[in-house]
Image (cartoon, grey):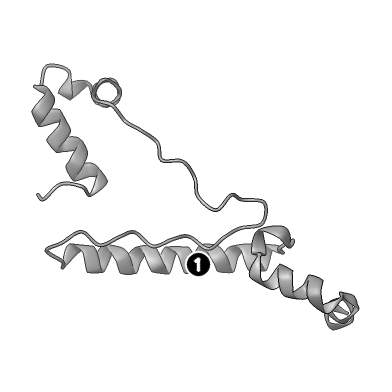
Amino acid sequence: MATAMRNSIPEDELFSREFEPERASWSSVESLLALLIDEVRNLTWVQVQSRSDSKVPRPEPVRRPGASRRKPARVLNLDIVRTLDPRLRDVPDEDVQDVLDRMTGRGNG
């Protein structure tokens, strides 16, 4: 049945759906497969990053239907970090920034 449905779609529309996955609908199997691919990429990145002297860029996630190409980055300022971790409330800004950089993978340590 899936083959018949696929064959009924005009070639130009089929072509555009294959290269723009966010326009096509996905089954739960396809969603789980995308999640699995993302997790394998992330685990590979962690392994490579832990053995590298330089910063390795994070892998891009598989595009999902209805999702924008990129999520805007969340910005954490030092006040938010201090609110999230009360142990840092009396710590100087430079030390809090060092902790934040290490947590986000931006630091050298």
Residue 39 lies, in percent from the top left, at 43, 63
Crowd tier of the residue under label 1, counting other residues whose Cα lies within 10 Å: few below 14, some 14–19, many 20 or above: few
Residue 59, quarter of picture: bottom left
Above/below status of 5 relative to 91: below
Q: Residue at x 87, y 82 (%)?
A: 7
Q: State how many labels appear.
A: 1
Secondary element under disc 1, as helix, strand or loop, is helix
Q: Residue at x 58, y 49 (%)?
A: 68
43 relative to 55 in the view: left or right: right
Q: In which quadrant will I find the N terminus?
A: bottom right
Depth check: give the residue in front, 86 or 6. 6
Q: Residue at x 12, y 24 (%)?
A: 93
Q: Residue at x 17, y 23 (%)?
A: 87
Above/below status of 64 relative to 40: above
30 relative to 11 in the view: left or right: left
Q: Residue furthest front?
A: 12
Residue 27, quarter of picture: bottom right
99 relative to 79 in the view: left or right: left
Residue 81 lies, in percent from the top left, at 26, 27
Residue 104, quarter of picture: top left
28 relative to 58 in the view: left or right: right
Q: Mark 1 — residue? A: 36
Residue 92 lies, in percent from the top left, at 8, 22
Residue 60 lies, in percent from the top left, at 44, 61
Above/below status of 31 relative to 95: below
- Amino acid type shown at disc 1: Leu
